[in-house]
Image (tube, rainbow, N blue to C red):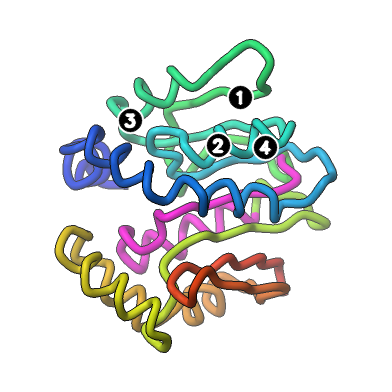
Amino acid sequence: MSKYFNQGWFGRHPIMYDFAGFFISPIRKFAAKKMGLEKLKIIDIATGTGAHAYQLAKQKHNVIGIDLDKKMLEKASKKIIPDLKLKFNYADGTNTNFPDSEFDAATISFAMHDIPYDIGIKILNEAKRIVKNTGFIFIVDYNNLSGIGSKILHFFARLYESPNYEPFVRDNLSSYLKNAGLEIEDKSTFLGAVQFVKVRSM
């Protein structure tokens, strides 16, 4: 991925990123619990400051968070404590260098909406490669603009989100998944504003 991602938009305000994360912390906790009771080996792609990876590790999963932003990863590393199976690597979500079928699941939390469409497809294809055939990809992100909750959130989100945000919420993942050969197994929302989508290979 380009310099934009590790030194540009995402890298400018890691403190603001964590501040916003404080307000979505309950959503991350809910999303982590939706991964189920079975203990999984999970890769958290575009982990940022590691908030989602941390919640997954607290559920006793074995988690590796990856990101291209070194400042974000510095903050993420502070979440590592001895009783959690949690670590963070500097890696590109489009080319992780992990072996095929290395993980039981991949998670992408509040990242797809910030990524250009073509990069999003590459990330999903890479996630497919490194997740077992029996595994799944779990995406947490903004929902489309069909409900009151999503429209309220959209009013504020468009003030600070990247230029890729609005195309994402208009598409609502459908063409991303189709072009990556993925289909939805389960979907739920939080107040119609945030979607939790579990997908597998077609």
SS for dot 2: helix
Single out the mark in the foreground, 4 or 1. Answer: 1
Quick one: 127 or 50, which is closer to the camera? 50
Task: Find out whether the residues at labels 1 and 2 contact each other: C-beta distance under 8 Å.
Answer: yes
Q: Residues within 10 Å of mark 3 (few under 14, many from 20)?
A: many
Corner quadrant of residue 92: top left
Mark before the other along the chain sequence, 3 or 1: 3
* Res 72 label: 3
Residue that badge 1 annotates: 86
Quadrant for the C terminus, please.
bottom right
Mark before the other along the chain sequence, 4 or 2: 2
Spot occupied by residue 188 in the image (x, y as percentages of width and height)? 62, 73
- Reply yes or no: does residue 113 show up in magenta: yes
SS for dot 1: strand
Mark 3 to mark 1 CA distance (whole Å): 15 Å
Residue that badge 4 annotates: 99
Mark before the other along the chain sequence, 1 or 2: 2
- Residue type at mark 2? Ala
Q: Which residues are magenta?
A: 103-128
SS for dot 4: loop
Q: Residues within 10 Å of mark 1 (few under 14, many from 20)?
A: many
- Residue type at mark 1? Leu
Residue 195 higher or lower than 69, as above or below: below
